[in-house]
Amino acid sequence: MTESLLTTPLDAWHRALGARMVPFAGYAMPVQYDFKGEMAARCKGGVMAEHLHCRDKAALFDVSHMGQAMSHGAAEALETLVCGDMIGLKPGRQRYTLLTTATGGVLDDLMVANLGAKGFFIVVNASRKDVDFAAMGASIPIARMDDRALLALQGPAAAKVMARLGPVAAALPFMGVARTKVAGIPAIVSRSGYTGEDGFEISVAAAAAEDLANRLIAETEVVPAGLGARDSLRLEAGLCLYGNDISETVSPIEAGLTWAISKRRKMSWDFPGGAAMRDLFDNGPVRRRVGIRPDGRAPARDHTPILTPDGNETIGEITSGGFGPTLNGPMAMGYVRTDFSGDGSKISLMVRGKPMQATVVPLPFVPHRYVR
Amino acid sequence: MPPKKSDTRYTKDHEWVRLDGEIATVGITDHAQQQLGELVFVELPELEREVAAGEACAVVESVKAASDVYSPLAGRIAEINETIVEDPEIVNNDAEGEGWFFRLELDDVDSFEELMDQDAYDEFLETL
């Protein structure tokens, strides 16, 4: 590491709690915690314990490395960049969508919220923010909000906790968004997340981040959780990680993200790469993203080759793989040739030079528990 | 009789070795298990395999990542601890005892003396 890492507004807060910091997308980020004192009584820390705590009660993630911006651009102009329905996105609503490339790949996946007169509130991946905001800036005004923190409160107890600190936020429906106060701190709150659990993403001024984080962990259900747990939670939920499962060279059609292309836009395909996507949509892609359960206990990691069951022919590659603490077993996502993409298809995985049997399964591995 | 702590030697890859005659018992250190976190999978070498000093011959996996375990010394795999394959958590709970990985019939018993003793390993950990 020759380049110095950026830090989030919660850097010192993480370290005081016993975080192990690692470089991620140019930032020093907590991968997991070795909790001390009272927090250790709630959760012993470590990826497994933090993951299970999130599914059991509530976990607090610092996702301030992600890119936040406001845009006063027209919905029509925004639609020239993304494949989702932005004209139909009502005030107070948020949508998962994709910035697409001219060749039909994914520039990034992102959240767009309609804050009414305030404009669109946009959250993009940390590793892509410069690329994204440059690309978007060519078509719509983009005001980066690099002075904001973003906290994600996730888990079945998240709503109960939020009810004590921010009743307006707690009353939001799934994918609802509001400018309101949490613990008296002005915030943009959405009912969303990336763990498969109910929860909230809370954007606040950087200067208020530590205050908010402390108010949230003062609630006894909540423990901080690191990037390790965030990754195993999102994989159990079958959600894509940009750079692993989706990229500029992967089509949303192959990735099984066709649902993110709204109905109206599937009529016109009038967004970057639309023609290429339409072709794949009509004729079917040669590879598809699938869920994979290895037969044994050994995890198969990303870049593991996927072969036919007899091991004779390579038919794909794992893009995310690990161990699911809630699933209590190994799990993976990857791309396979379409004739092996049906649920129940038998495949093999080449792990450390040995073929390992595995089965294609439906996603998610762990059912989503969003509020509806 | 359990060996004295001072009879244990260590490597910079965080394996420990204990010698009993020509048989060396090998595992990963408590520091290593702490760094790895909860183990979810262990793969051990096959019996009778000849391993060189520093050769990767076992694998440990946590939720997050896979790591190699290296043979500290050259020899033949004489015994493996199947219980940690069944229950990898034993390594987290007792890395330098019940959580041993394999036993090695050493090619050269004297090579044991060349490994770090407890004090040298503790000093090494300070530098990390």
Image: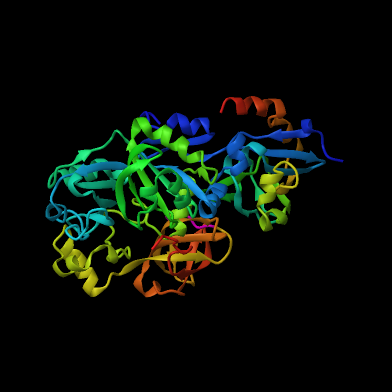
Place of residue A271 in the rendered image (x, y in percent of width and height, measured from the top left): 16, 59
Residue at 13%, 45% in the rendered image? A138
Residue sitting nearer the eye, A220 or A168: A168
In the image: residue B34, left or right of residue A87 = right
Q: Is residue B22 magenta?
A: no
In the image: residue B83, left or right of residue A27 = right
Residue at 47%, 54% in the rendered image? A233
Place of residue A264 in the rendered image (x, y in percent of width and height, measured from the top left): 17, 67
Residue sitting nearer the eye, A168 or A233: A168
Place of residue A89 in the rendered image (x, y in percent of width and height, measured from the top left): 22, 58
How many discs appear? 0
Q: Quadrant of residue A279?
A: bottom left
Residue sitting nearer the eye, A156 or A268: A156
Secondary structure mainly formed by the magenta segment: loop
Q: Residue furthest right?
A: B1
Place of residue A160 in the rendered image (x, y in percent of width and height, measured from the top left): 47, 51
Q: Quadrant of residue B47?
A: bottom right
Residue at 55%, 46% in the rendered image? B67
Q: In what quadrant of the picture does the C terminus of chain A appear?
A: bottom left
Q: In what quadrant of the picture does the N terminus of chain A appear?
A: top left
In the image: residue A22, left or right of residue A337 = right
Region in magenta: A299-303
In the image: residue A77, left or right of residue A123 = left
Residue sitting nearer the eye, A251 or A176: A176
Q: Is residue A300 magenta?
A: yes
Q: Quadrant of residue A364?
A: bottom left
The answer to whether residue A271 is seen in the rendering is yes
The answer to whether residue A44 is seen in the rendering is no
Q: Is residue A28 above or below residue A259?
A: above
